Image (cartoon, coloured by chain):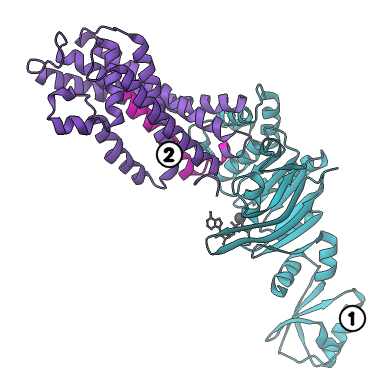
Amino acid sequence: MNPAIRVAGVTKRFRSLQALAGVDLEVAQGEFFGLLGPNGAGKTTLISCLAGLARPDSGTLEVMGRDVVRDYRAARMALGVVPQELVFDPFFSVREMLRIQSGYFGIRNNDDWIDEILHNLDLTGKAGANMRMLSGGMKRRALVAQALVHRPPVIVLDEPTAGVDVELRHGLWQFIRKLNQDGHTIVLTTHYLEEAESLCGRIAMLKAGRVVALDTTANLLQRFATHTLKLRLAAPVSLPPPFSARILSQEGAELLLGFDHYDDVGHLLAGLRAAGGEITDMALGKPDMEQVFVGIMNQN
Amino acid sequence: MEGFKTLLYKECLRFWKVGFQTVLSPVLTAVLYLLIFGHVLEDHVQPYPGVSYTAFLVPGLVMMTVLQNAFANSSSSLIQSKITGNIVFVLLPPISYREFYAAYVIASVLRGVACGVGVLLVSLPFAALSLAEPGWVMAFTLIGGAFLGSLGVIAGIWADKFDQLAAFQNFLIMPLTMLSGVFYSIHSLPAFWQGVSHFNPFFFMIDGFRYGFFGVSDVSPWVSIGVVSVCFVVLAVITLQMLARGYKLRA
Ligand SMILES: Nc1ncnc2c1ncn2[C@@H]1O[C@H](COP(=O)(O)OP(=O)(O)O)[C@@H](O)[C@H]1O
Ligand SMILES: [Mg+2]
């Protein structure tokens, strides 16, 4: 079986700026895949190369085994892209726009599917509304609808939840999850790391145009994150070894300690008391993607 | 094919939805020219024997309207799509650059024709027009419109801002159409300016188009159609090259 996405040796330069510096990546069919990285890491550029909106300087990209340059028709039929920018055509209503988009992909009489998408995205009531009249969140969902008119097996969403409120975000994720369960491959970029953590089976992290981490979400968490104990003390103390090795960060009387098992907490607290620390506030934290992200970005 | 047809349909719908601005307003402009110039010059100028000035003026205005609006259609559609960013919706689907080109150019010709027909209909009460050889009228409309539609594609893709496009329109398209013999027969010009006119492709479009009505023209319609066709083919090749490379459309 072909991978849903194959990226091999892709480089892309904008004048003096190396936006992609040799990216290799494979996403299997049916995966829910996260593409993370700070602003300017090259996520959107990589998606643009995949969608034919940009041309790589070297390397190849395939969607469902179809080369995006040589076999662009088949590759584009297999790909649905939700662009990062909130773009729309002010001349048309939501339904007109979706019919036109269907036509671009060679599909006539697509209204049954269009109705289903609109229903799932809670846009049924806005089908006749001009695109200009929609709120930001609605425009974002209309963009998602637009990417789905041709039932692409691979769906790429570039920061789809930027500027979407919490409730809508939940609805959107429910729908995207359902699409994934129905067999669609999903690739997602987002700034909400907890979103990526809860949704994505595998994650690639991009920095300065390079893949700096690529693993399952579980493995990344295991390798790069620990449970944390956040403490505020009445006054700063200096912890002796072996406890000092647990310090992740210390700022005055604020202390962040890492640990692997809940049993360790007792020892840590005992050690702290022995060192004369008086606790005024305390919070436990689970391993999360933010630690992974910060850790990996600082390493590289 | 379906992708091409849909893009063509969308491009037509786009101007038709704002027809007041894209069709009626250019028709009004042309009719104002007709009323004012016709009124002032009717008794003073007779370009061809047996053809009144107003009658002479009508085909020129019709063709000028066709050309200017064909240019306006593709150029304004493309620059709007680029600036608002919704150009991605036509770049993401499996539409080839040839289909892309054909859709934009044909829509431009159709807008030009819609405007031209409007001017012609409104002018009929003012001038006794004959239609000597309608085949020439059709041929020059189509090729002239396609030439300007193609030029509009280039301008719309090249320009990054509306004022760059306005400069293209005001410093190139307007002077070339105005100075192409819409309002006069070039035989009334000094020899030097007659010579200069022969480097303006718009002159041949207007002159050939007018031949279709009166069966008289400054140069043979065969020469005109030859010049205009060569110009169109050269421009089409350049435009297709631009689109094939993705110039300013695909980074
Ligand atoms: N069309 C372009 N022209 C010039 N530079 C660009 C262009 N597109 C992106 N870049 C630059 O390439 C780098 C990667 O950008 P991008 O892919 O948008 O990052 P991300 O989506 O990860 O935030 C950035 O430094 C950006 O400024
Ligand atoms: Mg981006």
Q: Which chain is purple?
A: B
Q: Nearer the viewer, residue B158 or A39?
A: B158
Tell me where the magenta segment starts and ends, as one range: B65-90
Label at residue A266 = 1
User: Along the horizontal axis of the image, is B19 left or right of B242?
Assistant: left
Amino acid type, callout 2: Ile
| Left or right position of B132 against B185 | right
> Residue B198 at what x, y percent from top left?
25, 30
Report, in whole angstroms, how far the alpha carbon at label 1 lies from the one at label 2: 73 Å
CB within 8 Å, label 1 to label 2: no
- Could one spot residue A57 in this view of the protein? yes
Examine the structure image and report whether residue B73 is included in the region drawn in magenta.
yes
Residue position marked by numbered label 2 in the rendering: B154
**Does residue A195 appear in the picture of this structure?**
no
Residue type marked 1: Gly
| Image position of A265 with respect to A199: above or below | below
| Ligand 1's quadrant | bottom right
The subunit letter for the residue under badge 1 reads A
